[in-house]
Image (cartoon, rainbow, N blue to C red):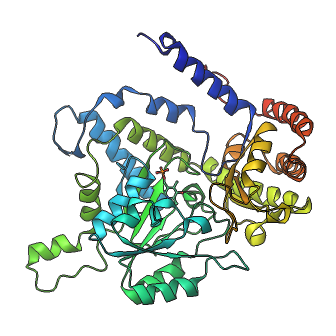
């Protein structure tokens, strides 16, 4: 095969996917549109290179260029987040979290994370995930009335179960995470604090969400969500291990025990992974450069303004929101007033109208995760397309109409036309074929 056109089935699907992305309103809060530059790096010849190890400490020859690429990615990430140490090799968020547990825990240790159906992530100790199989998982919820993380509950569980790691971070939480409060609890019980900022990393980089530093010992983020880089992850940490137990160790072993950076690096490679994806690492470097620019700060601020505008419009049109609003990029629509377990039906109706979302549990959902009672949306993609508050008011009005009349397919078709027209005003990837 010479080009992708020589694989017509895959080529055609890629072309259709481009059209789908260009002609729908994408509100899935974990997705984004990367730049052409990030796409270029991801699709580059760097994919051909094996580079097990770290810059200037590799196992194979031929590393001159990838060593430099990876070093640049690390330096940029350090600047972007003010991190002391960065590992950019993690394939994605899930293996990155497992690598962190591998670095800091022994099997059977206790980890304390947020429940999946309350807005936490699978890898924070959900029962079907490896994180709960190898570790003793204890989980916190949100407050039933306010929908907010209840720091008193976190503290109570931490004091009772003495976790090795406390995880602060969520996938469906529309409010600010108080990393300082988590640190206090972590200190009280002698636990590490892991901040998983996968969803909000772009907001942190833009300065519109408080930074997890200096509170967290370890910070994990995916690079493909609000941060707007390639699909992947990175781990940041302090150089020194605050909790190192060096009692009775000789000088050399004590130094090793204190070196948190090296524990993380060794847990990623060789502890968890083989060869890093240097094409993706190059794309991460490109995305970090973009995130260091003044335009990125404006993008981050606009994401939040857009989310607030969408929240107000939805509420004015009779849609209930978990926590009654948003302070970040994400909104969780509570559809229980319309009936139990309507999230999926609403998401399908919205997709028929050209508005792409995902169904999601709401806190204390009386239904099941497969048939949840909420819809999760977010503004990163529409913001990357250049949409502002005016467009959010239109989209919010359309969404409320569809949700309140979920079976009305002619209404869905009518709105599909309007969505199409709106998308034409915000062209994206116009030079691309796929
Ligand atoms: C997305 C996400 C992850 C997992 O990332 P993958 O790249 O999908 O494995 C982990 N933690 C949080 C909080 C996330 O939002």
Q: Is residue 122 above or below residue 92?
A: below
Q: Tell me what residue is drawn at x 45 percent, y 33 percent.
A: 42
Percent from the top left, x then y, of residue 338? 85, 61
Foreground of the two, 56 or 98:
98
Q: Nearer the viewer, residue 209 or 14?
A: 14
Front-most of residues 416 and 287: 416
Percent x, y of residue 137:
42, 73
Q: Position of residue 319 (x, y in %)?
A: 85, 61
Left or right: residue 167 compared with residue 431: left
Position of 178 relative to 12 (above/below): below
Q: Quadrant of residue 20?
A: top right
Q: Quadrant of the N terminus?
A: top left
Q: In this rendering, is residue 391 above or below 426?
A: below
The answer to whether residue 264 is visible is yes
The C terminus lies in which quarter of the figure? Answer: top right
**Residue at image x 73%, y 65%?**
326
Q: Residue 354, can we see it?
A: no
Nearest the eye: 206 or 29: 29
Q: Residue furthest left?
A: 250
Which residue is pictured at 91% across the width and 58% down the height? 317
On screen, residue 296 above or below 341: above
Where is residue 151 shown, x and y percent of the image? Answer: 57, 83
Relative to residue 61, is residue 87 drawn left or right? right
Side of 340 relative to 32 (left or right):
right
Occupied quadrant, residue 387 = top right
Residue under the image location 29 percent in, 63 percent down: 102
């Amino acid at each position: 095969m010479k080009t992708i056109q020589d694989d017509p089935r895959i080529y055609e699907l890629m072309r259709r996917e481009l059209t789908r992305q260009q002609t729908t309103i994408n509100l899935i809060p974990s997705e984004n549109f990367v730049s052409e530059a990030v796409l270029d790096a991801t699709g580059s010849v760097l994919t051909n290179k094996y580079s097990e190890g770290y810059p200037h400490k590799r196992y194979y020859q031929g590393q001159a260029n990838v060593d430099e690429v990876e070093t640049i990615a690390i330096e940029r990430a350090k600047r972007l987040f003010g991190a002391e140490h960065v590992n950019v090799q993690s394939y994605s968020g899930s293996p990155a979290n497992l690598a962190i547990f591998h670095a800091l825990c022994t099997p059977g240790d206790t980890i304390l994370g947020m429940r999946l159906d309350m807005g936490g992530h699978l890898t924070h100790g959900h029962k079907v995930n490896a994180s709960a199989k190898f570790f003793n998982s204890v989980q916190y919820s949100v407050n039933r009335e306010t929908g907010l993380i209840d720091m008193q509950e976190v503290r109570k569980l931490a004091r009772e179960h003495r976790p090795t790691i406390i995880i602060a971070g969520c996938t469906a939480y529309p409010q600010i995470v108080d990393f300082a409060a988590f640190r206090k609890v972590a200190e009280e019980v002698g636990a590490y604090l892991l901040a998983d900022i996968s969803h909000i990393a772009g907001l942190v980089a833009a300065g519109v969400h408080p930074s997890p530093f200096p509170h967290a010992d370890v910070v994990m983020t995916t690079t493909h969500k609000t941060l707007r880089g390639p699909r992947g992850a990175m781990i940041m940490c302090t150089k020194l291990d605050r909790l190192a137990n060096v009692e009775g160790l000789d000088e050399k072993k004590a130094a090793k025990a204190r070196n948190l950076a090296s524990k993380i690096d060794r847990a990623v490679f060789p502890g968890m992974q083989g060869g890093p994806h240097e094409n993706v690492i190059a794309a991460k470097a490109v995305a970090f450069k973009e995130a260091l620019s003044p335009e990125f700060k404006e993008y981050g601020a606009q994401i939040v303004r857009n989310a607030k505008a969408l929240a107000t419009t939805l509420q004015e049109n009779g849609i209930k929101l978990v926590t009654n609003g948003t302070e970040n990029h994400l909104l969780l629509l509570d559809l229980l007033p319309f009936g139990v377990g309507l999230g999926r039906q609403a998401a399908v109706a919205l997709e028929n109208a050209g508005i792409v979302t995902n169904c999601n549990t709401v806190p204390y959902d009386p239904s099941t995760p497969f048939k949840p009672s909420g819809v999760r949306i977010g503004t990163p993609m529409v913001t990357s397309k250049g949409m502002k508050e005016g467009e959010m008011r239109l989209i919010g009005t359309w969404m409320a109409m569809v949700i309140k009349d979920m079976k009305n397919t002619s209404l869905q078709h009518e709105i599909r036309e309007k969505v199409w027209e709106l998308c034409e005003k915000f062209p994206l990837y116009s030079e691309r074929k796929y």
